[in-house]
Amino acid sequence: MASPTSAPLHTQHLVPAPASTKIRLALLATALCDALGAPAEFKPRFSFPFISLMKPNGNFSLGAGVWTDDTSMMLALARSLATYNASGGFDEADQLEAYLRWYQDGVLSAIGRCFDIGSTIRRALKIYKDALKASGALSPAETRRALARIARDLLGDGFGGNGSLMRVLPVGLAYSRDPAGAAAYARRSSATTHPNAVCAAACAAWTECIARLVRGADAREEQISKLDVLHPFAAYPWPADADALRVALAADVPLPAGVVDPAAIEAHYTAHHPLMRLRAAAHTEALAATPSAGDAEALAARTRALLPSAAALPSSGYVVHTLAAVLYAFLATRTFEAGALLAANMGDDADTVAAVYGGLAGVWYVAQEEEGADGEEGLFWSPRVRAWRNALVRRDLIEEVAGELVEFVERHAASSLSIIRARKSQFILQLNLLSASSTRGGLSISVHLYTTYCKNKRVW
Ligand SMILES: [Mg+2]
């Protein structure tokens, strides 16, 4: 197999697979990476033994393979989208109630109780719970008031944590056919606990990326490369109130107009994008450090050589740091395993960086749902990843929620299709009526309409 690290971004392509496969494995990959990185949470980079397998989580006195709040909240959001009001859909109150069930009763937790929660999320849930206490069930107007209170109290710069980014994956998975709509939902999803503008913009951009990849993989658009993942972040129209994201993720020098050759675009970003400069330096170092990496020690050395210092690439709970660290882990490696090792060994907010990476990397690398189906050393499955999977606790819960989300997506697609078919029948009926009453003028209108229909058929 080729090196798991260096290769030009424009030569690494999205692995095609049906949306249902991508959804199932993206949820699993999130939990795998969350559990892998959890023991390194709160620890400074390079201050802990190298992580390459599931280890006990000493931060909370938990066994190996236990996933944390990141996965629980992601599952809660996925279940809400899949089951709201019986047929599924987006509803802020339903999402907040799902988060509360996890926080208070341990629903969708790995060990039957919530053992960690971010301070901003705790405050948002308290506001919502207080509103619930006052009136039992909230009317739409009361829900709006509770959300307005959350927006007012948790808007400041001190509330720019990664708590909404870490759970937003299901929005992009569920609404992949409509990236712009998915981005709007992502902003609203963030606002339930993280109304801060930077958090909302990060969730929107991330969701657009996930939705586009799921849609592209499902349609077997094999030409989407990792450069096509980097470019939208580098050139994103970051709003003025989320300028920190522009500073971290935009190129110092915008891509000149007219540059279309992928190798030339990549060369530009390698010179002018902060993450790409780090990547180039780290690849040179990794190559020099371990020319013939093979055993566990060499794996640790190679992974560490790929890791910039925490000063150059922080992995803190600040949403900007998290997003940049995740993109780096994805762009600096070329297998699911190599990126997961990189993210987990960053330390600090390692579980969240790894969990967010897992969602993207699951969508990118998974070819087949069945483990091992893409070979002993595939881009997603490897002996080490299978060992992580075997050590993961409550895999059944993750698979159950993933199944619900897949069902929602398929139901949604089927109902969209029936609307399209109904519109098509109505249109053809109109054509027939026109033709039936046709004089020469009517016929020419029919021909015009039919031609328009044929032109638009792909969209329909
Ligand atoms: Mg966590």
Image (tube, rainbow, N blue to C red):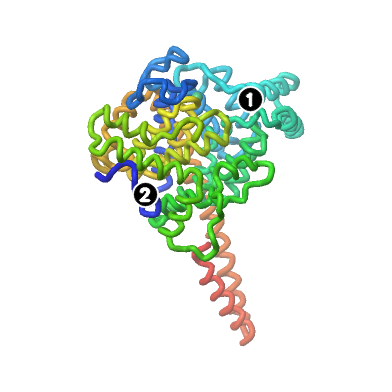
Q: Quadrant of residue 365?
A: top left
Q: Earlier in the sequence, mark 2 or mark 1?
A: 2
Identify which amino acid the numbered label 2 is placed on: Val
Screen quadrant of the N terminus:
top left
Task: Judge: label 2 CB < 8 Å from ligand 1.
Answer: no
The residue closer to the viewer here, 18 or 451, is 18
Local secondary structure at mark 2: loop
Q: Which residue appears at 45% of the width and 48% of the height?
A: 214
* Residue at 50% from the left image edge and 28% from the top image edge: 70
- Horizontal placement of 94 versus 356: left or right? right
Q: Is residue 281 visible?
A: yes
Residue 15 circle label: 2
| Residue 139 can be seen, yes or no | no
Q: Looking at numbered disc 1 in the image, what kind of residue is underneath it?
A: Thr
Q: Quadrant of residue 243?
A: top right
Which residue matches tag 1?
120
**Residue shown at 25% from the left, 39% from the top:** 291
Residue 279, image x and y in percent? Answer: 42, 43
Rendered position, 397 above or below 199: above
- Given residues 297 and 99, the one toward you in this image is 297
Spatial CA distance of label 2 from label 1 is: 36 Å
Q: Answer left or right for 143 relative to 263.
A: right
As drawn, is 276 to the left or to the right of 338?
A: right
Whether label 2 touches label 1, CB < 8 Å: no
